[in-house]
Amino acid sequence: MGLLEGKRAVIFGVANERSIAWAIAKTLHKEGARCALTYATERLKERVETLAHSLNSEIVLPCDVTSDEQINSTFSAIKDKWQTMDILIHSVAFAKKEELKGKLLDTTREGFQIAMDVSVYSLIALSRQAFPLMENTGSIITLTYYGSQKVVPNYNVMGVAKAGLEAVVRYLAEDMGPRGVRINAISAGPVKTLAAMGISGFGEILKRVEERAPLRRNITQEDVAGVALFLASPLSEGVTGEVIYVDAGYNIMGL
Ligand code: NAP
């Protein structure tokens, strides 16, 4: 029997086969969870539906996380179909390409607002809807990056957003903990995905990690999915409000 037999997971952030959310969805499914997938835009509909089909997902819904209306209709569809849910995966972030190069000094008000809305506020908005559907226990997992803690060239406004996201995790852990609902972040090392390719000089970051990380390699989407499985399962019942690094150890190095 799988670790997540009988559990229901709602997953935000599958864009294609390289998405971290897709590796997580496959792993949760393998351990017995039923997975509902959402997609951000009509452009992704067909691709995400095909992926969802391969996991026998009975729920595939459009949800742009900047729209309260779409968030409401997504969760009311989940409630109609499942009544309750156990796991929420938030694997969503966005900043305009021009904000992910050069200096933070040049960040525009609009660019800042977009990055914070999609990448940070969305976790609050989705958690608020998921919380009442989680009975007694529940696990919410989001994805962050080390650029929240230290300066990573070009990461700029997204570093600020990830710092905010990690603070949101701690505050929501306190809000939801008394009813047994947990929330944690996984701080993933760099992985070549669609979102990552928008960061200027991303190839250099990959090279640096491979040279310097204690494990002398980059991580894979599957490395992240393994820790997501741990956080989604009863194995981590005493863990909430944490940021767990899956980065081949890179963050422990001083030089
Ligand atoms: P990805 O495959 O491009 O996933 C990002 C997802 O966010 C996409 O599905 C994207 O949809 C979605 N998204 C963007 N704007 C949205 C909106 N308004 N509403 C709903 N969804 C929206 O890249 P990924 O690397 O797997 O990213 C997943 C998470 O991991 C992100 O939070 C990212 O910051 C984090 N992370 C990534 C790395 C890395 O190196 N790859 C490292 C650490 C943390 P569209 O494609 O339609 O925009």
Image: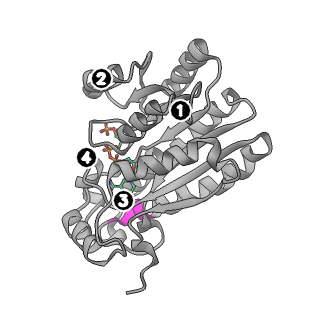
- The mark that comes first in sequence, 2 or 1, is 1
> Residue 244 vs residue 204: left or right?
right
- Residue 255: x and y, percent? 37, 87
Using the rendered view, name the quadrant where residue 219 is placed.
bottom left
Whether the residues at callouts 3 and 2 have beta carbons within 8 Å, the answer is no
Residue furthest toward the bottom?
A: 255
Whether the residues at callouts 3 and 4 have beta carbons within 8 Å, the answer is no
- The mark that comes first in sequence, 4 or 2, is 2
- What's the magenta region? 155-159
Q: Which secondary structure type mostly characterizes the magenta part of the structure?
A: helix
Q: Amino acid at mark 1?
A: Gly
Q: Amino acid at mark 3?
A: Thr
**Location of residue 181 with respect to 33 vertically, above or below:** below
Using the rendered view, name the quadrant where residue 178 is placed.
top right
Foreground mark, 4 or 1, reads: 1
Q: Amino acid at mark 4?
A: Leu
Spatial distance from mark 4 to mark 2, Cα to Cα? 16 Å
The dot on residue 108 is 3
Q: Which residue is mark 2?
A: 45
Q: Amino acid at mark 2?
A: Lys
Ligand 1 placement by image quarter: top left
